[in-house]
Image (cartoon, helix red, strand yellow):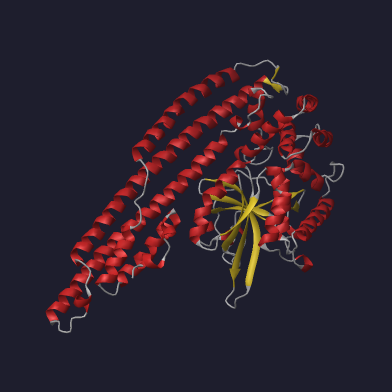
Amino acid sequence: MGLFDLNPLGALETPAGRRSWLAGLCTSIPKAADKNDLLDQIDDALLVCAPVGDTATLESLGKRYRDQVHHAGDVHGRVNKVAHKGLPEVWVGDTSVLASDGVAAVARAATRMSEAFQGGAKALHALADALGTAKKQDADGRAKLQQAKQKLGPPDSFFDVGRMIETDEEKAEKKAVLAAGRTLAADGVELMHRAAVAADDAVRAAARDLNKWAAEARAGKMHTGRLSAVDRLMLADTSGKAGAADYNEILTANDLERSGRAMDRLSPADRARMDRLLAGAKSPQEKAYLMKALAAGHGVDDIQTFDGKIHGKDPAWLQRHLSPIVTGADSLKDEGTDPVSGANLNTELQGFDGQEWAQGGDGQEGTCVASTTVTARAMVDPVYALSLTGGPGGQEDDPAAFRQRLIAEQHRMHVEGHGGANWNGMDLQGQEQISNKEISPETGSSYELHEVRDADSRRTILPDIEKAVADGKPVPFDAEGYEADGTRHGHSMMIVGQEGDKLEIYNPWGKTTWVSEDDFVNGGMAKASDNRLPNAYAVHLPQN
């Protein structure tokens, strides 16, 4: 009986299933007990489909993307000339944008467009190269398996197996044929497995990069006729005062889409009020936060009240009060790990006036799920964030008062999710419940629990995680680990950013850091926490 007889055919329908299937055969084929067993396992390997995809089409698409880089460079050059000619201080657009600021935004958009075309071309060419190599490896592997079948000959019948008299020479010859067949088959299935892994990894990497570049086409996300092109461009271009501009845009791709749709749904009277609020804003950041409030689902009455609290505040004040997570330009630097705890040395504390966004205020309480949810909601809803940092009037700059409000909100959500006594722990169903109650209305996406208790399932879900994060939707997840005596440790964290093959992790101990995709897949999450918590086992994924 072969491996196929013991597994459902559905196992071969996914990339993870195929690579897992072939990995199992890489182990079992060298141990095949007899000729018939080996032949069955060879047939099981040949059931796996070859890597699919047209490399010529991918290369052609990559070339088309690369050709556009030159055109984007021309746009940047022409805009740059305008920017250096000394523009008059005139206002343009519907929301009162300085012409000089608009031209500067166009120049940055042209640069990003060039980078996106270049990045897309690179992703497609890399996929074409990897797929071509994988197809050759797979074909070579299949050829070796066919050679093994030819060497072994047809399966032994009952009479072959049951012969009572067999000379030593016949036994030795059968043993030699079986050994040679095993060697050929083992080499063949190893090549097929390597091809399946390479093709799967290449497709996921291309999907990750293309999703990221698509999300970076920011101005085009706001589909509304209610704002001029320069207004849309400026809103998409605006970042917080601190941190790297590309990592701290105020409006995410999802915010831009939702705010555009919300603008189109406003009544004429509300639209006129919203226009006045935007035109009266004292900075691009103030405008962006007003639109972010609209994206989070607030009506114009609420936004007008919110505007009264933030109007005229400088960009640093706005970012401090309204953006819980700020990502530094050097945050991706690899500084190694602590030899005792296993945690990354390069971490960033995330706080308000020195008080971290931490569970229980100091990271010690067992309210990690509720605390992650509070921070997630504050990330996507600036009105909610200000209620915590600025208090009822929105004007406070008091870290002690912020701490009290933060803990009270963490406790409220802990009770809402039916968390354990003494502010200790919450089950997966409770976490899914509060994610959908507290975050979904602001993002427009419901959250669905996915248990990912092995490397294959974590690898499979990565593209969906990275797509959600690229769009600006935070992704809560849970990690666990076991001590030698069986004691379990569990903790909730959140994926809030993605760059290349790195994921930015918020830990409700009050900090962020970056880990690799490999860390997420293969038990390296101690880098975002400590050695007690190596394995991600559940993801709460936003659904489109």
Task: List x then y, in percent, for residue 131.
Answer: 36, 46
Task: List x then y, in percent, for residue 138.
Answer: 31, 53
Task: List x then y, in percent, for residue 304.
Answer: 82, 33
> Residue at coordinates 81% horizontally, 32% vertically from top-left?
311
Q: Quadrant of residue 40?
A: bottom left
Position of 152 relative to 389 (above/below): below
> Residue at coordinates 79% horizontally, 59% vertically from top-left?
411
> On the rendered image, what quadrant is the N terminus found in?
bottom left
Observer-nearest of 22 and 383: 22
Observer-nearest of 88 and 520: 520
Q: Residue furthest right?
A: 393
> On the rendered image, what quadrant is the C terminus found in?
top right
Observer-nearest of 268 and 193: 268
Q: Is residue 277 left or right of residue 490?
A: right
Q: Is residue 35 left or right of residue 72?
A: left
Task: List x then y, in percent, for residue 474.
Answer: 64, 48
Q: Quadrant of residue 96?
A: top right
